[in-house]
Image: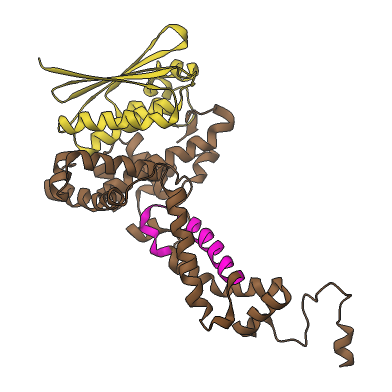
Chain colours: A brown, B yellow
Amino acid sequence: MQLRETWEQPAGSKPRWDPLQTPLSDVTEKELLRRIHGEQDQEAREELITRYLPLVRGLARRFASRGQPVEDLIQVGSIGLIKAIDRFDAERGVELSTYATPTIMGEIKRYFRDKGWAVKVPRALQDLNVRLNKVIEHLTTELNRSPTIADMALACGVTEEEVLEALESGRAYNSLSLYGGGSGDDDDSFEILDCLGDEEGAYEVVEQRRFLAPAMERLDERERLILHLRFFEGMTQTQIAARVGISQMHVSRLIRKAIEVLRQEMVPEAGRSSGGVAA
Amino acid sequence: MDVDTVSITIPDKDAFIPLLRLVLGGVAMRKNVCFDDLDDVQLAVDDLLVNRKPDGGQISMTVRVEECRLDITVEAVVDEELCRRLKVTPSDAAGEEEVAVLDTRTVLHSLMDGYEVQELPAGRHSIRMTKTCS
């Protein structure tokens, strides 16, 4: 008891660590919640957030195919988690996980609704855009050429105008996704999950073309490869898609995103021009 | 020879740029242009217009279609340095440059069959691009 008293801090401050207390990692969830809401214990709050991050990651990955960087979704989901922890009322008799899941999902969905689409896009068009991704890939294989708008409309059972609108809505959507996808680690990159690309021998070729500019470091190897194949080897998107093992629409998105990243990097030096990026 | 011409003039504001893509898409749809070629043309126009210098004026685009050839002319206030560079083809510049450069000139050169730049009054430029679709 005497020893414990020696660890007591001046009034108003909390000990950061007390060797006689159970480590936070071993404290029960219920106790953490009690400390959070009863004592405003920030360390307990951080511990609980850390414990629930895997839930956030799992939920974020459910939205991985919607074109936003998963890392961004995890960050947004984490805000939902924090809100859930702060608002949670243990006396209601439900588990925190039960309460937190819809809150996290709601935050991610709100992000898509508010930020994901530069232009408000009806759900039907969003769905069609997702379908087109697969249809283009399928038709390219079946027809042995890049499909026309009419081909896509026929395959989807919609009008050609609807195909155009859906493609354009995809542009609106993807224009906001500048730095994500493909550049994160394997666990968190939906694009990696999308394609699971094999080791690509042409990476060496790309290196030989000396992608030296700092801006290029913002791109991952696959993005550099795609830019190289498209702009310096003259391959079509369809050919690149077949070579890299992803869909044509995905190639299109990556090209646009990569160019946008380069452009953003060059802004301080070259105004809005994408000019001057060594490749 | 049957030539179809579509023109559009929009305010020189980011929010209206998608209209140009829609027009290109609409033309491509009616001329059975494949997605590959459509995306190339849209990206070329997009990338070119990133270099514009909005002056509160307008951007105009004219698309002429003759059989499978797209002839697109964009008129806007575009960065003069870019226009100067566009007049030098990447292959001509290759000897001068230490490394390959991915800029709007290279993008246009790669995506389109050809392009030419013409100066217009009031700091505007006309950039004409052509592409023969597969």
Residue A256 rendering spot, x and y as whole percentages: 39, 40
Residue B16 rendering spot, x and y as whole percentages: 39, 29
Q: Nearer the viewer, residue A49 or A277?
A: A49
Residue in view at x 48 percent, y 38 percent:
A262
Q: Nearer the viewer, residue A87 or B62?
A: A87
Residue B88 rendering spot, x and y as whole percentages: 40, 17
User: Total label count?
Assistant: 0
Against A168, residue A87 (above or below) is below
- Taking the image as shown, residue A58 lies to the left or right of residue A6, namely left
Which residue is at the far left?
B1
The C terminus of chain A appears in which quarter of the rendering?
top left
Which residue is at the far front?
A92
Which residue is at the far top?
B121
Against A2, residue A126 (above or below) is above
The N terminus of chain A appears in which quarter of the rendering?
bottom right
Residue B65 seen in the figure: yes
Residue in view at x 54 percent, y 27 percent:
A271
Which residue is at the far bottom?
A1
Residue A210 seen in the figure: no
Residue in view at x 39 percent, y 60 percent:
A63
- Residue B89 colored magenta? no
| Residue extent of the magenta highlight | A61-86
- Our reading of the magenta stretch's main secondary structure is helix
Picture quadrant of residue B31: top left
Against B59, residue A209 (above or below) is below
Q: Nearer the viewer, residue A219 or A210?
A: A219
Residue A175 rendering spot, x and y as whole percentages: 42, 41
- Taking the image as shown, residue B113 lies to the left or right of residue A56, namely left
Against A88, residue A257 (above or below) is above
- Taking the image as shown, residue A96 lies to the left or right of residue B21, namely right
- Residue A81 colored magenta? yes
Residue in view at x 45 percent, y 38 percent:
A260
